[in-house]
Image (tube, grey):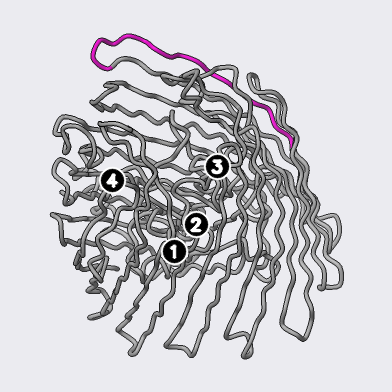
């Protein structure tokens, strides 16, 4: 079926006129839900462009995020295994993921697997670290990752398509097709890919098919309709942790199927008044077999319906007001996959209103104030707010950024209806603040950013091993410093790096939070010595970690130091001619032997290469 879809789209592409598509990215949207110049955006926000993603030959959203400041990403296994993101030390279900503004369903566990989403049709990724509930609602104590699909080519541009194939270590191969075009007022872009790997650990094979369609139709100068979609299905073995009885387990597996369908409309009522609304339906289905002390063979299903309305009013040249409404409904279903016995069939919903004011003063000061009220059917009615300011210090080339905010995260399906769930749980809540500085040097060729952040998260949902119940009884605190720099040495050489120091504490237990390194860093360079050759090198590391192992023998639970690690990678591509590009990369260049999470070995050095045909 997948090969037939690829063939149909490829045949359609052949009929289209050929050309190159160029996308400009002069602004950031995730920080305010409206376009804002990057000069006024806090160092808490990072932008990954399509050019950067392609040049580094990154394959998944997980690959893209792990090199950003304040972010640590780990996997309970090798390629395709569940990938968890800890943004500024918050929980792995405290970061919200959006696709073209639509909420990505986190599934029954409340934790979206970043390893599942490819980058084949992604135009850019905007990341906002820190409390973001006032703008985006639940699951955003740690921040928001906004994934934006490629836009349709501008009017008058030709269509473009590309076919890419690569192969490499661990029995890995991937084929992908990208397509973008315009026919009058109708524009589209789409990406399809199939990826497979055997990995190194026995019974850890993984395969996934991805499809990301995006369509846009302009009725007239005032009204535009759009449709955003996402579909993937994957399967992988679950060999388990090294300390598990029977490792590597041959019978355990996981199958996942996900889809999103979301129509929307943008209305420009006047030059100063715009209305954006959309409806989105997503469904995440998971079948999983895990054996051991607790054997589980279940079908999980989480369905989300989201309706969103946003109104932007440009009251004056320097004052923009935004109001919005969101309706969200979540359905959770779980059944015994062997006997078909229904175990969970529950739903919850929420109604939310929010407002935002953006005010500029003499191009020196930018103030943003927000307020939000959410009413949940089951979890109370949290109120959140945030205030942020940016101060341009003029000829010094420096700017100061301040922010204070509250945020919340409601319990997820597994918290409420899992084996140890508690349907009486309330939302987790946080108070946070940050202060940052950005300095431009050498005629804006170099940028330095430094930021201090602080999070106090209470009503944390934890499992009580004595009562065997899940409760709102925890409290954690995370604080740290993020530093980042970029230096465009000249037109052919770019240097970059970032460093994060973080202290993440479980105040309830009086100990460090697990799986949060105290120090992380990334540095590298990219260069184009000729018009047809690109080359880059990157090194990253995680230091001073604490993790937990669960051996089958007493004492059954052990806190361990999984060790520091330093990962290198090199990548290069050569444009042979107008249509053919050859590329290759080496992952884990130093052949580091390490566990991303305790007792789950990461991959050794891997070598990969391929070719892209573009028209």
Which of the two labelled residues, at mark 2 and mark 3, occupies the earlier sequence position?
A: 2
Q: Which mark is residue 67?
A: 1
Magenta-drawn segment? 337-353
In which quadrant is the N terminus drawn?
top left
Q: Are marks 4 and 1 in contact (CB under 8 Å)?
A: no
Find disc 3 in the rendering and name its residue: 94
Residue 344: x %, y % from top left: 43, 14
- Of 273 and 356, the residue lying toward us: 356
In which quadrant is the C terminus drawn?
bottom left
| Helix, strand or loop for disc 1 | loop
Q: Residue at x 29, y 38 (%)?
A: 233
Q: Residues within 10 Å of mark 3 (few under 14, many from 20)?
A: many
Which is closer to the viewer, label 4 or label 1? Answer: 4
Q: What's the magenta bit mostly, secondary-structure-wise? A: strand
- Of 393 and 533, the residue lying toward us: 393
Residue 372 belongs to the span the image colors magenta:
no
Find disc 2 in the rendering and name its residue: 71
Query: Which residue ends up furthest to the front in the rendered image?
Result: 554
Residues at marks 4 and 2, CA–CA distance in whole angstroms: 21 Å
Residues at marks 2 and 3, CA–CA distance in whole angstroms: 12 Å
Residue 562: in sight, yes or no? Answer: yes
């Amino acid at each position: 079926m997948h090969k037939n879809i690829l063939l149909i789209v490829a045949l359609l592409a052949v009929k289209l006129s050929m050309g190159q598509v160029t996308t400009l990215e002069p602004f950031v949207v995730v920080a305010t839900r409206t376009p804002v110049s990057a000069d006024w955006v806090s160092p808490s926000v990072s932008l990954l462009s399509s050019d950067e993603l392609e040049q580094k030959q990154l394959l998944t959203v997980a690959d893209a995020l792990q090199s950003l400041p304040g972010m640590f990403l780990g996997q309970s296994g090798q390629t395709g295994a569940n990938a968890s993101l800890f943004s500024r030390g918050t929980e792995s279900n405290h970061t919200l993921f959006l696709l073209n503004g639509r909420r990505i369903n986190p599934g029954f566990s409340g934790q979206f697997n970043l390893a599942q989403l490819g980058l084949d049709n992604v135009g850019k990724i905007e990341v906002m670290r820190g409390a973001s509930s006032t703008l985006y609602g639940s699951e955003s104590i740690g921040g928001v990752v906004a994934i934006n699909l490629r836009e349709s080519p501008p009017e008058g541009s030709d269509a473009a398509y590309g076919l890419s194939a690569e192969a490499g270590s661990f029995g890995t191969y991937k084929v992908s097709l990208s397509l973008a075009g315009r026919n009058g007022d109708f524009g589209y872009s789409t990406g399809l890919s199939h990826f497979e790997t055997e990995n190194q650990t026995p019974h850890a094979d993984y395969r996934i098919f991805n499809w990301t369609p995006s369509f846009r139709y302009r009725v007239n100068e005032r009204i535009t309709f759009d449709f955003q979609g996402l579909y993937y299905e994957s399967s992988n073995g679950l060999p388990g942790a090294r300390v598990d009885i029977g490792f590597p387990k041959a019978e355990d597996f996981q199958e996942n199927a996900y889809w999103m369908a979301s129509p929307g409309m943008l209305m420009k009522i006047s030059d100063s008044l715009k209305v954006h609304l959309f409806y989105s339906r997503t469904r995440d289905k998971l079948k999983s077999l895990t054996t051991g002390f607790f054997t589980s063979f279940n079908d999980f299903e989480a369905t989300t319906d989201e309706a969103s309305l946003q109104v932007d009013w440009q009251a004056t040249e320097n004052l923009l007001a935004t109001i919005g409404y969101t309706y969200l409904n979540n359905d959770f279903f779980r059944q015994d996959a062997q006997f078909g016995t229904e175990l969970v069939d529950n739903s919850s919903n929420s109604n939310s209103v929010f407002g935002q004011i953006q005010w500029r003063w003499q191009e020196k000061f930018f103030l943003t104030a927000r307020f939000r009220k959410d009413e949940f059917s089951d979890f109370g009615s949290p109120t959140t707010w945030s205030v942020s300011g940016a101060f341009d210090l003029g000829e010094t080339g420096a700017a100061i950024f301040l922010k204070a905010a509250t945020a919340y995260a409601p319990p997820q399906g597994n918290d409420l209806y899992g084996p140890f769930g508690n349907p009486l749980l309330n939302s987790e809540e946080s108070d946070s603040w940050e202060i940052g500085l950005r300095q431009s040097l050498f005629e804006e060729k170099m940028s330095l950013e430094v930021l201090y952040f602080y999070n106090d998260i209470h009503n944390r949902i934890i499992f009580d091993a004595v009562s065997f119940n899940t409760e709102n009884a925890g409290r954690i605190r995370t604080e740290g410093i993020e530093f980042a720099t970029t230096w465009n040495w000249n037109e052919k050489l770019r240097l970059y790096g970032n460093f994060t120091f973080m202290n993440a504490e479980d105040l309830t237990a009086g100990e460090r939070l697990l799986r949060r390194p105290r120090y992380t860093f990334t540095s590298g360079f990219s260069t184009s010595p000729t018009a047809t050759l690109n080359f880059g090198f990157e090194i990253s590391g995680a230091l001073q970690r604490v993790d937990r192992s669960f051996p089958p023998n007493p004492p059954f639970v052990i806190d361990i130091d999984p060790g520091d690690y330093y990962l290198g990678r090199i990548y290069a591509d050569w444009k042979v001619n107008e249509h053919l590009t050859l590329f290759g990369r080496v992952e884990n260049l130093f052949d580091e032997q390490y566990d991303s999470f305790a007792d789950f070995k990461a991959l050794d050095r891997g070598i990969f290469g391929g070719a892209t045909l573009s028209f």
